[in-house]
Amino acid sequence: MQNILHIHNATVYRERNRVFQNLCLNIDRGQHTALLGPNGAGKTTLLKLLAREIYPMPGTDTVLRLFGQERWNVWDLRSRLGMVSQDLQQEYPGNVSGREVVLSGFRSSIGTYAHHHFSREEVLRTDQLLQALSVTELAGKSFRSMSTGQQRRLLLARALVNDPQALLLDEPTSGLDIKACFFYLDTIRELMRQEKTVILVTHHIHEIPPEMKRIVLLKNGRVVADGPKEIVLTEQAMADLFETPLRLLESGGYFQVVPA
């Protein structure tokens, strides 16, 4: 089975703050995984590490491989690993149209520019994704005029233009209303059925799809638990992770927490 992510003994700093020390984590293709933790657990740093925006400290036994490679042209990586993050959403210029958001995925850019030229096949792929994600009507609208849910769907289409093997999603339903949240989760589940490996980084337990069987708990820059959902996702483990009394509820394969 192909390895998507292999991290071994990685020590990672953000400015002068050490976030991870001797971090080890492996994710194989087809191994849908939720990385769950409270604010300050290191989730944002991990996202930036996988996006090649930051790097671990050099070490004799430190390894960070994506799809079996340690060195990547970041533009080539984007065609293998589609990413949707809140940082990306905030970086997009408000005047960019919906179609330009999706097209920009072919160039791994934030928006499109005059020197960008797109083939007929790229334009066709864009229109297919706009239709598949039910956002065709947003093609000509400005990004700033859209709801958070509409923006998130366009960014998902952007992540899918190169037909990546894996998707890295950062709190994908944050800021969405109930209808938009349910639509987005259904879309993620369909992508998983299409054999897209989904890596979910979140502190929202309700975002974890029923098909996601592996849970990794992060706290204070450490992996405190890693294993099958039925073993890791327990009431006591959630209470310890978020340091608050709670009850864990399950319905239809989805989980939610309420105060104890």
Image: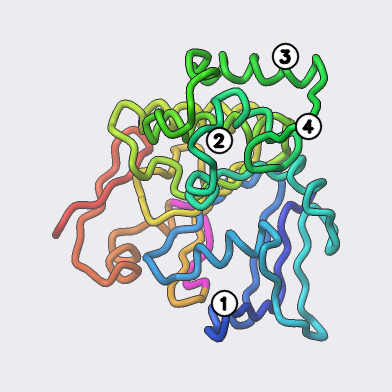
Q: Main secondary structure of the magenta part?
A: strand
Which amino acid, by three-letter code, is at mark 4?
His
Residue nearer the viewer, 112 or 220: 112
Residue at screen point 51% across, 52% down: 87
Crowd tier of the residue under label 3, counting other residues whose Cα lies within 10 Å: few below 14, some 14–19, many 20 or above: few
Magenta segment: 223-229
Amino acid carrying label 3: it is Leu
Q: List the residue tagged with mark 4.
A: 116
Q: Which residue is mark 2?
A: 155
Q: Quadrant of the C terminus?
A: bottom left
Q: Distance between the Cα atoms at labels 1 and 4?
A: 34 Å
> How far apart are the two marked residues, 4 and 2, measured between alpha carbons?
19 Å
- State which quadrant residue 62 falls in: bottom right
Tell me the mark number nearer the camera, choosing from 4 and 2: 4
Seen in the picture, residue 79 relative to 36 is either above or below; the reply is: above
Measure the alpha-carbon separation of dots 2 and 3. Answer: 17 Å
Q: Quadrant of residue 80?
A: top right
Residue 203 point in image, percent of width and height = 38, 56
